[in-house]
Image: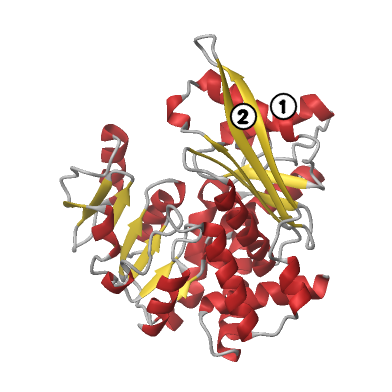
Amino acid sequence: MQNPFDNAMTQLDKVAKIRNFGDEFILRLRQPDRDIRVSIPVKMDDGSLKIFEGYRVEYNNTMGPYKGGIRYHQNTEINEVKALAFWMVLKCSVVGIPMGGGKGGITVNPKELSKGELERLSRGWIQKLSDNLGPNKDVPAPDVNTTPEIMAWMADEFAKITGDKTGAVITGKPVGQGGSLGRDTATAQGGFYAFEALRQELGLDEGCRVAIEGFGNAGANAAVIWDRAGYSVVAISDSKGGIYNPDGLDIAKLTDHKKNTGSVLGFSGGTDITNEELVGVDCDLLIPAAFENTITEANADKIKAKAILELANGPVSPKADEILFQKNIPIVPDILANSGGVTVSYFEWEQNLSGDSWTEKEVFDKLRTMMASSANKISEKAKESQTSLRMGAFIAALDTIKAAL
């Protein structure tokens, strides 16, 4: 598998050739401020002891406290976490929130743990990293396979250790425990607002055909949001495979099928396809919403979509990016498209620190304004430099960070 951090640095090198930011500034962004690895001992239900490896990368805090999710996955490793932390720096800058970038994770398959083991592991991560965290230092959030309940355990453990009562050290908590309304759908909702702002520029019509790779939080919510807005969702996949119907899928029935069977496969309202086939289905908008390196030079030529919107982090490799640019397939980049999650996490942090509570309408009104403004900004930067939307987003982000430095 391609190294995600190498991909991120390739993107940084590319933008440095388009705009002269100065060698020293680019050099500062090539390494994180801190790269922390910890061992987390957990007493298992059978009485045995197991050691898990945990991570926190604090990449850059020029714009404010480090901010970024915690990922639980068996393939999580330090280069992935470094790449995600780097992209988070740019993401916060692109949408104009006063936070830096970080990322965390644990190498674990959470499906293999009991609830008690999962709680002990989550509290163990906080115990090992509590000195590095804090509302004005480093503010984690959920990511792949981490839930509001896990965030609540972490916030509680941090409060026990430090006495902090604001809850602002962790975002993505349950609404009744300091979480923000709208956080559960924020990534997909923010992606939709960015899409709305750029749709005409992408050459797409209202109600066009959409294919979504991934049926986790981002992908499942995207399916509902695009469907309700009148778009035809023709294909969706999960980790086991995909389903396709050129006339459009019934998202409500498909969601029920997924809950009942554990997969989208076998849904009576469509035809089973592989994850590889989903990338190449006939559609107007392709939304990769799962993991890095979904689209590479090996399958970029198979894409029939007119445009791509990245709800996942780093789903298009640099070489595939070049191929798609030559094919005139525009990409709404991850550092804009999926920044709705961190933006609403920032809203939660603000509410916690002020003791305030916003309505869902207030949250989404603020989110729509910020996403639309950021989309227009990166479009202008791309046109100024005659480059892609991705490079336009990098230029916008780096301009902001360099000005702050």
Q: Amino acid at mark 2?
A: Ser
- The tally of labels here is 2
Q: Amino acid at mark 1?
A: Glu
- Image vertical order of residue 212 relative to residue 16, above or below: above
Question: Is residue 372 in view?
Answer: no
Give the residue at x 78% y 53%: 65
Q: Nearer the viewer, residue 76 or 379?
A: 76
Mark 1 residue crowding within 10 angstroms, few (<14) / some (14–19) / many (20+):
some
Residue 84, by quadrant, is: bottom right
Task: Find residue 157 and name its label.
Answer: 1
Depth check: 332 or 50 in front? Answer: 50
Residue at 59% of width from left, 89% of height from top?
Answer: 385
- Callout 2: 10 Å neighbours few (<14), some, many (20+)? many
Residue 44 drawn at (x, y percent)? 54, 16
The answer to whether residue 89 is left or right of residue 135 is left
**Quadrant where the image shows the C terminus:** bottom right
Tell whether 79 sits left or right of 93. left
- Of 369 and 171, nearer the camera is 171
Q: Which mark is residue 122?
A: 2
Indicate how the structure is coloured in the image.
Answer: secondary structure
Mark 2 and mark 1 residues within 8 Å of each other at the beta carbon: yes
Residue 34 visible within the image: yes
Q: Is residue 293 left or right of residue 175?
A: left
Residue at x 54%, y 90% (from the top left corner):
386
**Element under disc 2:** helix
Residue 78 lies, with reference to residue 5, above or below; the image says above
Image point (30%, 46%), residue name: 252
- Give the CA separation, mark 2 to mark 1: 9 Å
